[in-house]
Image (cartoon, rainbow, N blue to C red):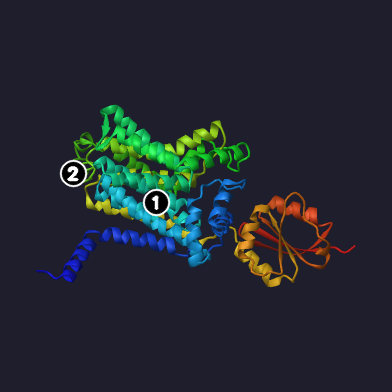
Amino acid sequence: MIPGDEMSERKLLHILRDNYLLLLIVLLGLALRICDLGGESVWFDEAVSIDVSRLGFVELIRWVAGPSRETNPPFYYMVLHLWIPVFGDSEFVSRLPSAIFGVLTIIFTYTVGRLLLGRRAGLFAALIMAVSFFHVRYSQEARGYTLMAFLALVSYYSLLRMISGWRRRWAAVYVLSSALLCYTHYFGLFTILVQNIFCFTLFLRRGRTGGLGFTRWILVQVTLGVLYIPGFILLARRFSSVRGSFWIPEPHYRDLFHYFNNYAGSVYMLALLAVFILLAIANSEKLRSVKGLDGLFAPADEAAPVKDITYGEKIYLLLLWIAVPVIVPFVFSLIFTPIIVSRYAIVSSVGLYLLASAGMSAINKRPVLYAVTAVVVLLSAAKLYGDYDGVEKHQWRETIREIEANAGSGDYIIVFPFYETVSAEYYLERDDLRIVPLRDRFPSYPDMETHDVWFVMHAHPVNRLKTIQGLSPEYDFISESRHNLLDLFRLRKKRE
């Protein structure tokens, strides 16, 4: 008999041998997400995430449900609420949960891809996800977008497992992950819409979806709906408070291209993904029977574990996965209130990668596969290099450090726009300086004549000129400095 320790060691070696490619992809994705994680300053949305996470649990719920500018449900804030008191709130630590969820998203992209389309497609999808500029970017931001993508994949995975064979545990995983998805971001509801369109289409065609019958699906959806009743209440309150005054601009039809260009990372990567999406859709016996192509393409979906739905139905699911989270809110934005931003529909990008991987996995020639892999990595690397080499976020850290290094005790820091006060407060360590938000009029206090005023504003040439012209009669401009997306003026009130 083989000793227990030796048997476990052999089992581990067997797992590593069979999954070394996935391990390398995950390590690559981890490295990209950790690299320079705390390099840039937190920007407004991240500062809000960190500030809200410091609230008590009840206060957090009240803040989300109250008359704040916040338009997201509370689950991501709850995650940070548990994380930050234990590990701290530095830039690196605050963003680390997003990076972790980003890595989990790579793993589950492979898992869903393998279950739906086969192992090769799963590996391609995981590789695209690992090097995706879009996902690396939001894995390095203290917001809930990578959590949203991860939960959506868990939801889809459990749905596919229910289709493969009904088990209550997979129904429970589906309900829990789907509820948490919708409590992370309201756009999670569009994932539930995709799944219902897909299942009801199959119910109408053949009465059931694999091992998932109509009655069971309705029961699962009713259970999910009951769990999300508080979410519907929050959504109704939020929509009634922002309608007609929301910050998101009205979209144009050209924005549809920009959304998918963002998901791909570049127009060249988008063109490559589009080619393989067309190949995935066209991959059939007819294509493989064309003279000269018969040895190039492998049978579609040959090794996918899910056999209860056809290859065409899987492609249909992925097309819904890509289109619905973008098209439905886009149309809603045109008719009612603008609600769509590309990052809100991050789930759509996962479907894009999976469908493109279906086309990539159809190639049967190894040299072509290697070439495609190299092109994917190189195109993504070019975009990522530009991101790591530049500065994208508002440089609040550098701005506040300059103020603290030069300000006298009792000096004022005026912040415009007013809501950026939370960003300034995150970095301010000196308690002898006073932060004042600029709202309708430039603030004036009696002791400003004896203290300097540090005015921080979003960088804009027109606003800079108006600031100089408007304040010159009352203030002397002692110095001016510029940081990324921020202008800093040191002012001294003129004596009468």
Visible residue check, residue 356: no
Visible residue check, residue 186: yes
Q: Are marks 1 and 2 in contact (CB under 8 Å)?
A: no
Q: Circle 2 is placed at which residue position?
A: 295
In the picture, measured across the screen, residue 79 lies left or right of residue 114, that is right
Name the foreground residue: 445 vs 338.
445
The image shows residue 171, relative to residue 126, as above or below, that is above
Disc on res. 191: none
- Provide residue 305's location: percent of width, then percent of height: 22, 45
Query: Which quadrant does the N terminus fall into?
Result: bottom left
Q: Which residue is found at the position 20% from the left and 41% from the top?
A: 299
- Provide residue 337's location: percent of width, then percent of height: 57, 35
In the picture, measured across the screen, residue 68 lies left or right of residue 360, that is right
Quarter of image, res 160: top left
Q: Which residue is found at the position 22% from the left and 59% from the top?
A: 18
Type of the residue with mark 2: Gly
Q: How many numbered badges does the structure rendering display?
A: 2
Q: Circle 1 is placed at which residue position?
A: 150
Query: CA gap, disc 1 to disc 2?
Result: 37 Å
- Secondary element under disc 2, as helix, strand or loop, is loop
Number of residues whose C-alpha sits closer than 10 Å to that of mark 2, classed few (under 14), some (14–19) or many (20 or more): few
In the picture, measured across the screen, residue 74 lies left or right of residue 359, that is right
- Secondary element under disc 1, as helix, strand or loop, is helix
Name the foreground residue: 376 vs 348.
348
Number of residues whose C-alpha sits closer than 10 Å to that of mark 1, classed few (under 14), some (14–19) or many (20 or more): many
